[in-house]
Amino acid sequence: MVVADAENVVTTTRDLEAIYYPEDAPEQEERYVRVVAQFCDQNGGHLPDFIARSPGRVNIIGEHIDYSLYPVLPMAIKDDVLVLVSTQADDATGLSPPTEDEFYVEVSNSDGDKYPCRRMTFSQHEVSSEPFAGHHWSNYFLAGLRGAMQKLMQKYGPGKSYKSMRVLVNGTVPAAGGLSSSAALVVASALAVLRAQGEDVIERKALTELAIVSERAVGVISGGMDQSASVMSQRGAALFVEFYPELLARPVYFPETKPALKFVIAQTFVKAEKQVSAAFGYNLRVVECTLAALVMNALVNPPGTKLMVDASPLQQSLRGFHETYFGLQKRDVAPEGDSPDRALIRQFQELRQLVKDKLHRQPYSLEEIAQILETDLATLKATYLRGYPTECKDFKLRDRALHVWGEAQRVVSFMELLKNPPADHGEPTVGDKYNAELGKLLLESQDSCRDSFECSVSQIDQLVQLGRIGGSYGGRLTGAGWGGCTIHLVPEDKVASVKESMMNVYYGVGDNFKAVLDTAMVVTRPGTGSTIYEPS
Ligand code: NG1
Ligand code: MG
């Protein structure tokens, strides 16, 4: 039993009420009983040694800015991934015991029809970092396993021997639904492997960092928002996550307003499978943001600050340009009488103006970018476009930078509002006005995602619109976009009418969504981050 401080290390518990809200615990208990029984069935009666769990997340505000190193505000949801593990290798389990050179892993999914079982053999001495060839659901497990094993092998050197594992995965986060089932699975897998191989004290920050790097092997150059939210969230609180100068997360509480504010998540049911269809979209955006930073730097900062081949992640980011630009000018971050938030907002406004002055509207070609960066096409491609679809010709640097700095500014404004709740909580008109300001920032975020970042789809706008008609303060896409999920800020007394409005027009027409209606619209609350559960 780990008894260290719950904020910094992953806690171990035998109490489901320590993980889920008390109202949800009975339903979860049934689920845990069911999957443990399935595990026993598949493993000659052996109970799992433990269950590693990690949740999906919803992002409240701060979209597509984590990989530009700007802070974001997600929160964990109740839906999660469970990874049940036994290290008993014997005739009953059917798992081969490890040898001096190898150990074995068998990973199955409780939805075996959809997600087939996979057996794998690993060297005791090294694990591959090769990107995965082809697509298999278990690549996400494998990504977490590799990250965990690499960490262990680094820590213990050649002396340690690793156990074989039998693993059962059970997830309730809808796949490709914008709620980060991927990060939940990678994190829960990494956590499961670390624990199974004997790590008793697992630091949350280290687990997050490991999961961020691991998930990239699946083919998406992810930022770090999802893994941070999955690992570090605390029940009842959203999570403010900073990536620079280092990964730092802290809980953020919403003020109690009257009317009370609820988060409604509504699915578009448009699948956003990034690693299959939209990898192009997501990874291309990461590249565009990087190139925008480099081009801005070349055009604006004095000679000698051109950043090429060996530029650090910060230097290659819009955040890096931001720091360099104001640093070079040696301007005060907070002029007298100005709060740091206000000063930052002014900087973002200035940066956006600078983009409008310096970057043209039409897309940039690689040739033009190479010319601005004073390099050749081959070097540019080799340095920044490895693994990207080479057919991509247009890079919309101006629009992408405008989105990133606008969105980063909205996060500051949102946090500023949270820090300054309305004085009179009891007064509905005050609460309404305040909540509406939060909602307005969500709506602006959605406009920018659609128009400048081009990561939305019409179904998202439709749901946002229907939410507004039903009485929401505002809504937006959440996660990468191109389908997936929407989030809406709704006064408690309007939740029913928001759902009704969406139902009448979006979900209720025809039979399209009949089978999935119970997951279409969900009122959610901030959930608990990664946990280890020990069945008693
Ligand atoms: P999704 O596709 O919702 O998991 C992705 C990235 C995030 C962040 C958002 C956009 C991964 C694992 N996650 O989220 O880091 O960049 O898009 O804000 O790629
Ligand atoms: Mg994902």
Image (spheres, rainbow, N blue to C red):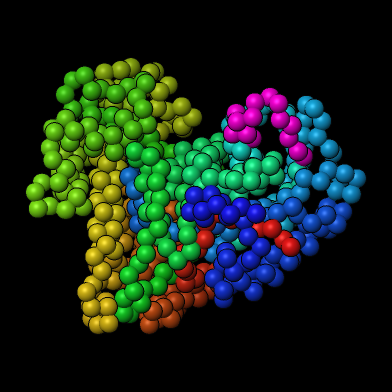
Asked if the stretch drawn in magenta spans residue 268, the answer is no
Asked if the stretch drawn in magenta spans residue 153, the answer is yes
Q: Looking at the image, which is closer to me, 452 or 422? A: 422
**Residue 406: percent from the left, percent from the top?**
25, 50
One can see residue 3 in this view? yes
Q: Which residue is drawn at 38% across and 67% down?
A: 488
One can see residue 478 in this view? no
Span of residues in magenta:
149-164
**Residue 48: percent from the left, percent from the top?**
75, 54
From this viewpoint, which residue is outermost toward the left?
336
Q: Residue at x 69, y 64 (%)?
A: 32
Q: In this view, does 118 lie to the left or right of 516?
A: right
Image vertical order of residue 104 relative to residue 348, above or below? above
Image vertical order of residue 384 relative to residue 53, above or below? above
Image vertical order of residue 316 relative to residue 13, above or below? above
Q: Looking at the image, which is closer to me, 259 or 254? A: 254
**Residue 54: percent from the left, percent from the top?**
57, 54
